[in-house]
Every structure is written in C-alpha cells, then in structure tokens.
Image (cartoon, helix red, strand yellow):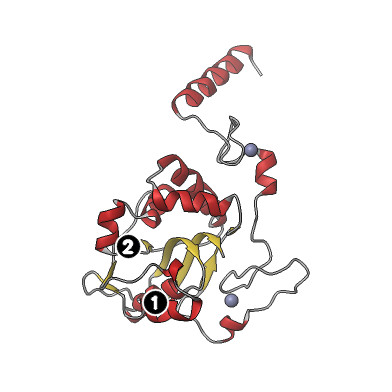
C-alpha cells in the first residue's frame, strides 16, 4: 500500500474513533469494529441450535425439529433470535429496558441486523408498541429504539388498546390472557400481501408476539417474521 494511502486510512480511523468510538460491549476494550471484540464475539451465547419456527433454544446434540408449541400453527411465521437470554446479553437487555442508552441500542441493533442479513425483503418494520402509560413513565420504547438503529426507521401501525401487566411479572400461562386483545391497528388499513418484520427486544413465551402477529394477519399480512435480540 502507498504510504500516503496508509496515512490517509490511519487518519480516517483516528477521526472515526474520535467521533464514533466503539468499545466492546462485553469487555469494554476499544475495538476497531463493534459492537463486541473478536474474543468476546466468539463467547457470546449464540442461539445456534433452536426450533426452526419460534427459535426456542435446543441443546447442541438435538436434531432439527419444531418444538411442542410449534406443532400447532402459530400466528407468526418465524422468529429470528441470534442470541440466548443469558449473561451478558440478559444484562444488556435489562439495561436497555430501564434507560434510553443510544450506544447500547446501536450495538444490539448491529447484532440484530447481522442475523437478518439473509432474510427479507420486508415491506414494513413494526416495533411492538408500549402502552401509552408505560411510554410516558419510561419515556421511550426499547423495541422502537432497536428498529430505528437496525433499519433506519419503522412504521407505527400497532397500538396498545389497553393497559397490561408487565409480562415479566406473570407466570407463563397467565401471559397469554394478559395480552389477549391488548393490541390493535392504530387506524384501519389493508396489509394484504405484506411481509412484516415485527421487532422486539426479547421473546419469552411469545404471547406478545403472537398477539401482535394475529392483529397483523387479520389485516391481511402475508407473513410476519419476528426479530428479537434474544430468546429466553
Ligand atoms: Zn471484548
Ligand atoms: Zn417452536
């Protein structure tokens, strides 16, 4: 490489590092390319073996097969969840829930986008909405934050129709009842033939995603792919 070219590149990297510093999300070291350094990237709890429909984590020795929940048709078509909800990922997502951390959102969005590189194209990107009350107290919606960083924008098509209890405080069997009928379209519209990407931070029992997907399908959506950072 020409030496002036090398200098130019080095200068550019220095400028970038100054204005857009990237620290490894896991170990905090400066890295050239985020969001995690090479060593930490290898060690992340990747969700490599999982249910082909809902991404439920499987042990490595299990052959590919749909899980018990997915033997019945589900309202969504597929869940993409690159990581498992284990430390340090669980800590990051907890962090994102309680503070509007743009760097953290940007870093997690990179991982989400990577996982979706071979998927799509999507006609619409829709974050799972927060209830107006929680939106007011929290001030932001972490699903919308992820969607904005990963895809540059999103459509606010879904709305919460009523307040629900936080899913994380309920046992699995009550979660479905808690969110039943809780979502609707903001305004009536025809989603015929659309492939929709529904974005959220985490997928646990899937009650929320299922309910949102049901609303979208009822409005005509052809496919609903759910994208989350982590699968519990
Ligand atoms: Zn690291
Ligand atoms: Zn499944």
Q: Are marks 2 and 1 in contact (CB under 8 Å)?
A: no
Of 170 and 95, nearer the camera is 170
Which secondary structure lies at badge 2? loop
How would you rate the neighbour count of disc 1 (Cα within 10 Å): few for under 14, some for 14-19, many for 20 or more? many
| Relative image position of residue 147 (x, y in whole percent) | 40, 54
Q: Mark 2 points at which residue?
A: 130
- Left or right: 29, with 219 as reference point: right
Q: Can residue 80 be seen in this view?
A: yes
Q: In which quarter of the image is residue 69?
A: bottom right
In terms of sequence position, does the residue under pointer 2 or pointer 1 come before the other?
A: 2
| Relative image position of residue 131 (x, y in whole percent) | 29, 64
Q: Quadrant of the N terminus?
A: top right
Q: In which quarter of the image is ligand 1?
A: top right
Relative height, residue 23 to residue 135 (above, below): above
Which secondary structure lies at badge 1? helix
Q: Mark 1 points at which residue?
A: 211
Q: Which of marks 2 and 1 is in front?
A: 2
């Amino acid at each position: 490489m020409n030496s002036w070219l090398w200098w130019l590149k080095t200068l550019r990297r220095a400028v970038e590092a100054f204005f857009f510093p990237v620290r490894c999300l896991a170990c905090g070291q400066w890295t050239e390319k985020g969001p995690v350094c090479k060593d930490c990237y290898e060690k992340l709890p990747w969700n490599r073996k999982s249910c082909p429909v809902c991404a439920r984590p499987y042990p490595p020795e299990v052959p590919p097969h749909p899980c018990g929940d997915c033997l019945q048709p589900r309202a969504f078509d597929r869940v993409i969840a690159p990581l498992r909800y284990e430390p340090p990922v669980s800590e990051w997502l907890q962090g994102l829930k309680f503070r509007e951390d743009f760097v953290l959102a940007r870093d997690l969005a990179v991982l989400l986008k990577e996982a979706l590189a071979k998927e799509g194209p999507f006609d619409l990107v829709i974050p799972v909405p927060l209830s107006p009350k929680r939106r007011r107290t929290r001030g932001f919606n972490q699903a919308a934050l992820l969607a904005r960083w990963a895809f540059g924008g999103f459509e606010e098509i879904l709305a919460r129709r009523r307040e629900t209890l936080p899913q994380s405080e309920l046992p699995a069997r009550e979660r479905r009842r808690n969110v039943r009928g809780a979502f609707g379209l903001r305004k009536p519209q025809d989603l015929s033939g659309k492939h929709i990407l529904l974005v959220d931070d985490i997928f646990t029992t899937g009650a929320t995603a299922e309910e949102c997907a049901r609303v979208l399908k009822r409005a005509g959506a052809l496919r609903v792919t759910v994208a989350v950072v982590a699968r519990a």
